[in-house]
Amino acid sequence: MSGNSCDKVLVQQVRKIGPTRRSVSGSYPFRGGQAIQYESTLERDFLIRHEFFLNVLEIIPQPVEIPFVADNGRSYTYTPDFLMSLRGPHGSTIQRVLVEVKPQALWKENWRRWSAKWKAARRFAQQQGWSFRIFDESRIRDQVLDNIRFLERYKRLSERPKQSDTLMHALRSEGPSTLPALFSCCSVAEDDHRAWTVMAWHLLAMRLIDCDISKSLDRTTIFWVPSHE
């Protein structure tokens, strides 16, 4: 997949999201900058979850209109919720994914009625060199999102812990390590373990260090310094 596959079609927000009575709408300041509109709490949680991953480069809401013919023979247009751009392995390619966010119960109930537009979305995505995916609660509200919400409180420390440079240096020198291994490497007194743990959560929340965010965060968590290539 080439990095310029997006040039095949003009991608921009094609539909504005206004207030709605049936769900919660709003805008999410993606990485503190671009305000991305959403129209449900599940869409908001999708944004929160994917903001954490360093390989997610951009998310565009309501990106394209896709024409399709429904089972009743009438022509309509379908607008997916998001277009997500991902950095591929070693930064060599840009992968793009058209995203539909739907509660599981809703898409299962309406699968036959919505299959025509989703088939059209898959065809359209393939023509652009993209993919198309449907995200429900099982792909959004999981251990990853629980961990990200846990880390939120550690973003807002009044000042960056003074030991952070020491921990970062230790991770670069020693390689991937658990908290107990870092405590030992840095000769951290037992009375200071809590402060150093808070510092580790802060660095992880700020994306200065990384771990397998799909697992529980505890003393067995292995941290490393991510590559930002």
Image: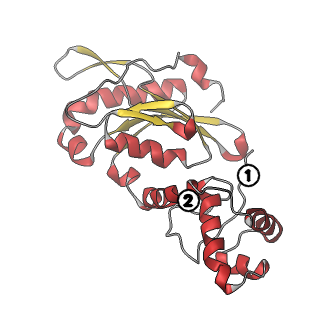
Residue nearer the viewer, 2 or 18: 18
Is 223 left or right of 120, judged from the image as shown? right
For the view shown, which residue lies furthest in the front direction?
Answer: 158
Q: Tell me the kind of residue under disc 1.
A: Ser
Circle nearer the N terminus (1, 2):
2
Residue 65 vs 117, above or below: the answer is: above
In space, the residues marked 1 and 2 are separated at their CA atoms by 22 Å
The quarter in which the C terminus is drawn is: top right
Find residue 65 and report its horizontal and vertical position in percent.
39, 18
Is 225 left or right of 86, judged from the image as shown? right
- Crowd around label 1: few <14 · some 14–19 · many ≥20 (10 Å): few
Q: Name the residue under label 2.
A: 154
Q: Residue at x 68, y 57 (%)?
A: 160
Callout in the foreground (1, 2): 2
Q: Residue at x 17, y 42 (%)?
A: 109
Find residue 90 and report its horizontal and vertical position in percent.
72, 46
Toward which corner of the image does residue 47 lie, by quadrant? top left
Find residue 99 and report its horizontal and vertical position in percent.
42, 36
Q: Name the residue under label 1.
A: 227
Identify the coloring.
secondary structure
Q: Residue at x 50, y 67 (%)?
A: 215
Residue 179 vs 5, above or below: the answer is: below
Residue nearer the viewer, 100 or 32: 32
| Badge 2 element | helix
